[in-house]
Amino acid sequence: MATKILEKRLIREPDVFYFKLDVPNIARAAQPGQFVIVRLHENGERIPLSLADIDPEEGTISLIVMSVGKTSSEFVALDAGDSIRDVCGPLGQPTHLDKLGKVIVVGGGFGVAPLFPIARGFKKAGNEVIAIMGARSHDLLIYEKEMASVADKVLVTTDDGSKGIKGVVTLALEQELDKGDTDLVIAVGPAIMMKFVALTTKNYNVKTMVSLNPIMVDGSGMCGACRVSVGGKTRFACTDGPDFDGHEVDWDLLMSRQRMYLDEEKESFDAWKARHQHMLVEPN
Ligand SMILES: Cc1cc2nc3c(=O)[nH]c(=O)nc-3n(C[C@H](O)[C@H](O)[C@H](O)COP(=O)(O)OP(=O)(O)OC[C@H]3O[C@@H](n4cnc5c(N)ncnc54)[C@H](O)[C@@H]3O)c2cc1C
Ligand code: FES
C-alpha cells in the first residue's frame, strides 16, 4: 500500500528536507537507530534512510533527506500529499539505550538527524548527554535546536570557524574526553568522520559505537551488498547493524565499497537531470 507524505519542510537551503510519513505499523514498532528502505515508485531504486523521529501515537515517522543523486533528488521533489510506493521497515537493530552515566553523541551531515531520537533516548534513560555536531560552515548545520532540546550541552564545530569551535568534531570531542568521565561515544555521519572519532576515542579507551552506511539493496541480509568487516568478521550492516563497535571496523574497506558504483551513479544522475531540470536542487 502506498504511503502518504503528511508534511514536508526545507531544513537547510537548498538540498536538505524533512518529511513526515503516515506509516502506523512502522511507527509502532520502530526504535531509535533503525532505518527504512523506500522505493518511490514501481521502477524506483531502493534507498535506505534513517529514522529522524518516531511518533507511535500519531503513527508517523520523520525522515531527513539530503539530495545527493538521482533517487534522493526525486524524493526531495515530492510534496506533502504525494505518495511513496513502498516504505519497508523498521530495519536494523535498535541502538542500546542503557543508563551508563555520560554519553557523547557526535553527528555530521544528515547523521545529526538520526542522532536526535538516540540522544533523546539516552537522556530519558537517565544519562548526561553531550552532543557534538560539526559542519563545514554554520549554514550547513542542521537539527541544532532539536538537539539542544534533549542534550545537556551542545558543542558546535565548523571547519571555517563561522560558528562554535573552529575545526573538526574531534577537537570538541577531545575536550570532553579529557574530563575522564565519558562512558560511551556514539557517532553518526560520513564514514571519514566516524573513522576519526573512533581513532580519537581509542586513545582514551572509551567504548564507541558508530552507525555504518554502506550501500544497501534488499535490507534483509540476503544480497550481501552491505557487508562490512568488523573485528575481522564479515557482518551485514542491514541486519547485524547499522551500529557497530567503531574500534573494530575496517574503515578502508567500508569507504572503498561506498565508492564502488560512482561511475554508474553519475551516469544515472546525469541522465535523470537531463530529463528533469525543473525538479533539480543543486547540492551544497
Ligand atoms: C543505514 C543508512 C541510513 C541512511 N540514512 C540517510 C538519511 O537519513 N538521510 C539521507 O539523506 N541519506 C541517508 N543515507 C544515504 C542514502 O541512502 C543515499 O544518499 C542514497 O541512497 C543516495 O541515492 P541517490 O540515488 O540519490 O544517489 P547516488 O548518486 O545513487 O549515490 C550517491 C551516494 O550515496 C550512497 N548510496 C547510493 N546508493 C545507496 C544505497 N542503495 N544504499 C546506501 N547508500 C547508497 C553512495 O555512497 C553513493 O556514492 C543512509 C544510508 C544508509 C546505509
Ligand atoms: S542490504 Fe542486502 S544484505 Fe544488507
Image: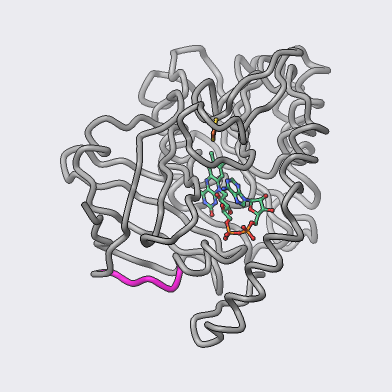
* Rendered location of residue 75, percent (x, y): 44, 65
- Is residue 269 depicted above or below 212 in this figure? below
Q: Position of residue 71 (x, y in %)?
A: 52, 62
Q: Is residue 282 depicted above or below 180 in this figure?
A: below
Quarter of image, res 171: top right
Residue farthest along the bottom direction in this orientation:
278
- Position of the C terminus, as image quadrant, is bottom right
Q: Give the left or right position of residue 98, taking residue 217 as reference.
A: left
* Residue 117 rendering spot, x and y as whole percentages: 41, 37
Q: Position of residue 120 (x, y in %)?
A: 40, 33
Q: Which color scheme is applied?
A: one colour
What residue is drawn where x is 74% and y is 31%?
A: 197
Please name the residue shown 51% across and 28% down the image: 222
* Nearer the observer, 283 or 160: 283
Q: Is residue 77 magenta?
A: yes
State which region is magenta: 76-80
Image-based side of 101 in relation to 224, left or right: left
Our reading of the magenta stretch's main secondary structure is loop
Q: Is residue 8 above or below residue 100?
A: below
Q: Any magenta on residue 169?
A: no
